[in-house]
Amino acid sequence: MAMKGIFNYFRSPRQGSAKVAKERLQVIVARERSHRSGPDYLPALHRELLEVIRKYVQVGDEAVQMSLENQGDCEILEVNITLSEPERQG
Amino acid sequence: MARIVVITSGKGGVGKTTTSAAVATGLALEGHKTAVIDFDVGLRNLDLIMGCERRVVYDFVNVINGDANLRQALIKDKRTDNLFILPASQTRDKDALTEEGVEKVLDELSQEFDYIVCDSPAGIERGAMMAAYFADEAIVVTNPEVSSVRDSDRMLGILSSKTRKAERGEGPLPAKLLLTRYSPERVERGEMLSVDDVTEILSIDMLGVIPESQSVLNASNAGMPVILDEESDAGQAYRDAVARFLGEDRPHRFLTTQKKGLFGRLFRG
């Protein structure tokens, strides 16, 4: 990895850090906008879902990801629950 | 009725006060009677940038509290006609800016002025909210740097929902971006976000791009708005931005590096 880093450094001096900055910003800005534009009950729903899940499985705050999308004339609330350590289930 | 413009950003140190001084001076130079107000209660600085710090007698909070009237508190600019400054108070009372008080002062100024430029403090606390609340439009000052861009997006969210205009259901506050401390050299080396990158991330119109320039520090050292330095790239870029703000269509300048000859490279780095 270190060799590759050095190699890249000499090979492509124009591949600077701005590209990384842009990618990181696009991700965080999109995420913060979706939180902002969502209805006021989303944070509470998120918290309560976590509480229910934690009755059965120990998960971190990041385990529940929610996103709200408008498609035509209906709204779709997508909830993704990630269980990172399945051996502890039950 | 005056048009109220807030100069805001979220992040500190990106050039809000420099921009407020430049835009207010630019509007006055174009013949519009302009007042520029420092909303940074506790940390007065616009007076220094405008070079009138020794002429401050009364301030914004004095007017709100009725200790002085507007005529006593407004400082007439010595260099530019049609330009007046209302300095911030240095009180540490963060609640000194009341919504009613700010509205009263803005209403009174509106009778007499064409433009009111509100220099917002950093952050999203009361001072910043008050500077933006009554505005008709916003100029968001951003540096091509991750934390500044993120904070600007947050501020754009606030402008679209927490202003009087938004609360009255008149839609989000119209906002334009002013990118400052831009270094074409570093952009070309891939080390700095480009104008296109920032516009794409924030999806907002670009009012102007101010190049990183020694003239900005020189101007603030001297207490002179940099827009008055007609020789400098930053001064000219601010002139362009003000012209665009007033509806003129001007191409953006200073976005690429000037190719230097051998001598230029040897002696100017």
Image (spheres, coloured by chain):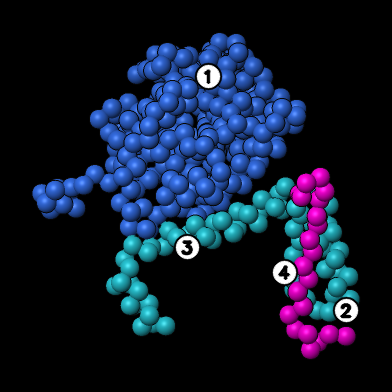
Could you tell me how far apart the alpha carbons at marks 3 and 1 are, in whole angstroms?
A: 40 Å
Task: List the residue tagged with mark 2.
Answer: A56
Of the residues tagged 1 and 2, which is closer to the observer?
Answer: 2
Please give the chain letter of the residue carrying mark 1: B
- Mark 3, residues whose alpha carbon is within 10 Å: few (<14), some, or many (≥20)? some
Q: Secondary structure at mark 1?
A: strand
**Would you name the residue on which mark 3 appears?**
A20
Dot placed on the residue nearer the N-terminal end, 4 or 2: 2
* Residue B237 in which image quadrant: top left
Residue tagged by mark 4? A62
Q: Where is mark 1, residue-wise?
A: B115
The answer to whether tags 4 and 2 share a subunit is yes
Q: Mark 1 or mark 4: which is in front?
A: 4
Q: Nearer the viewer, mark 3 or mark 1?
A: 3
Q: Are marks 4 and 2 in contact (CB under 8 Å)?
A: no
On the question of residue B45 being in view, the answer is no
Residue sitting at the far top: B112
In the displayed structure, would residue B214 be above or below residue A34? Answer: above
Q: Which chain letter matches label 3?
A: A
Q: Is residue B144 above or below residue B40?
A: below
Q: Nearer the viewer, residue A74 or A82?
A: A74
Chain B representation colour? blue
B67 or B34: which is nearer to us? Answer: B34
- Of the two numbered discs 4 and 3 in the rendering, the one whose residue sits closer to the viewer: 3
Residue A66 coordinates in the image, percent (x, y): 76, 61
Q: In the displayed orientation, state which residue is furthest to the bottom.
A: A87
What is the span of residues highlighted in magenta in the rendered image?
Answer: A70-90
Number of marks in the rendered image = 4
Residue B171 lies in quadrant: top right
Answer left or right for B40 relative to B219: right
